[in-house]
Image (cartoon, rainbow, N blue to C red):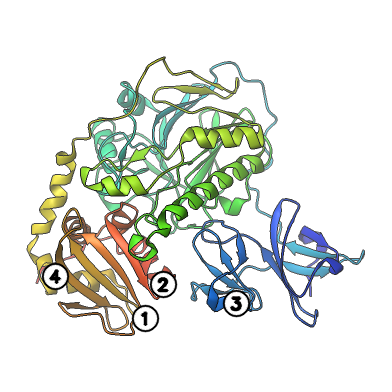
Amino acid sequence: GSPPRGAMEIVAEIDPVDLKPGANYLRQKGHGLIVHVSEDRKTIQACLNRCPHQGGLFAQSDDIEDAGTCVAKCRRHGWKLDLATMQFVVPSDLGPAQQLHVHLGGSGLIELQREPKDTPWNPLPRQQELQPGELTVTYLSHACVEIKAGGVSLITDPWLLGPAFLQGWWLQHKPPADVWERLSRADAVWLSHSHPDHENYHTLKVLAEQRPSIPIYVGDLPIPVIRPEVAALGFSDVRVVPIGEWVRLGGVSFMVLSDECLPAIDTWMLLEYKGHCIANFVDCSAPSGFEVPDSQVDLVLSDFASGSSAYPSMYGDVLGDRVGDMVKSKRRTFVNKTVEMVRKTGARAFVPIAGYFVEAYPGDAVVRSVNVKNTPGEVASAVSSRVGAATWVPYPGGSFDVGLLRGEDAAEGATYDEDSWDFERYIGPIKEASQFGPLQAQEGLQSYFRWAGFEGYDMVLWLTECSDDFSETVRDFWVDFANGARVVVGERVPEGRRYFRMRVRSTSFRYVLLHGASWDDLIIGFQAHCSEHPPNTYYREFLYHFQHGLPRSAPDFAP
């Protein structure tokens, strides 16, 4: 039976005559919908047309093995949903989709219902007039901005020097000359998540030396935002705040909310001042499941670039010539998502952040040429033309006035791009790790994978350690997770086994193993060329564990 109607939100109302047996892809009341009708028309199942991975849209799968079925395939990363059973088939271990309640209304229309969405930000205070300069956002670098509201200064995600993801990402812009003064005198810092382009060790090390008592706010997530090496820097005032509750900072209120795609890992922020709101989505894939404020949002801050993951740029070994077209498609999807988020919030303005990085390391010229990104101007133009919001493309030290809905113009002829990254200072320690004795032996590798704690999974990890330019093989081995994570060196992967292959920079790989670091450094950091067998297999549990689920204590390689 259906829950009491008063407790439910009606997502859509559909005339039964408009539904055909099989899959029906619809859009109503701003929602993409999938409605599956059985051949005898006695059973109707429905869900939102939104992939739980990164919010992509499903369409009928065109894969040959799905011909004649009702399997839907996500246009972004190929996840598949069997609409007849409402079970995911890729990844096969994901389980059922979240269905909508199907109810026959008194008018004869089919009502699709769901639990009312959670809106912890409501009610918002009535908006008051802002004076010029009273609420501003100053761009510093990448995802790092200074939000000033009535004398309160809050700085987000400081990455101001050095690389992120080992040697994979480098700052595109030179931060403004006064950036360290701004950071050390700020009232607080907010870290959205633990990725090193947001929680940057090199930057935070300097900040800890300058002002270890600065308040640092993070969301209370199942996987702690503060990484162990950052915790060891000695910050004395880290404030872990509940998800979805207002936090008061002087005359400002802000709320940390989670990402539906990675709820244990990633967050976004809603900041309110005098009833005016800034939604800083940073680089969340599905902020609050796309259930976001739809009024009183003056400004959206969001990523724009695409190109911040290994797929498809580092999957050329399996995708071949399709990589270029897939990069273009992903960029278009990213633009559409950004436009939709601005539209959903009803925001009056949009500023692109969290995409100002470059694969600057000389050995990454090929990656840089393949991993083409959206420019901030392209995305700002799309938002302006399709939504009508004001836009501003930021530059280091430039400010956007929320009250005036206007950003400062850059000085004529000024250049802000970084052109010197001091590679050896940061890459030297990575190269040194390759000389660590235990990791040169099979026993050391076995010790690591035993520490990692991942087994009982029908997959072989095939690792080929390569030279810096990937032209030479340093070592080839595989790990059998179906048999106690057994490490085998110098033998071929057995015929018929499912595997995930990584051709990885040996220096980077051994650094990650030595320090027990997240494999995000290898995968997001463009340190590995990846492929899978069978093709189009997504080894979700393996990737999630090595990217997010490793023990927080470093591995012990003592005999």
Q: CA distance from mark 3 to mark 1?
A: 27 Å
Q: Which mark is residue 67?
A: 3
- In the image, taking residue 376 as reference, residue 276 lies left or right, namely right
Mark yes or no: residue 248 visible. no
User: Where does the N terminus fall, quadrant-wise?
Assistant: bottom right
- Mark 2 vs mark 1: which is more N-terminal? 1
- Comparing marks 4 and 3, which lies closer to the viewer? 3
- Comparing marks 2 and 1, which lies closer to the viewer? 2
| Tag 4: amino acid | Gly
Tell me which corner region of the image, top left, top right, bottom left or bottom right, holds residue 446. bottom left
Determine the residue positioned at 74% across, 68% down: 101
- Mark 3 vs mark 2: which is more N-terminal? 3
- Mark 2 vs mark 4: which is more N-terminal? 4
| Tag 1: amino acid | Asp
Asked if residue 333 is positioned above or below residue 412 in the image, the reply reads: below
Determine the residue positioned at 42% across, 37% down: 143
Mark 4 falls on what kind of element? helix
Residue that carries the numbered disc 2 in the rendered image = 535
Residue that carries the numbered disc 1 in the rendered image = 458
- Comparing marks 3 and 1, which lies closer to the viewer? 3
Callout 2: 10 Å neighbours few (<14), some, many (20+)? few
User: Where does the C terminus fall, quadrant-wise?
Assistant: bottom left
Mark 2 falls on what kind of element? loop
Mark yes or no: residue 315 visible. yes
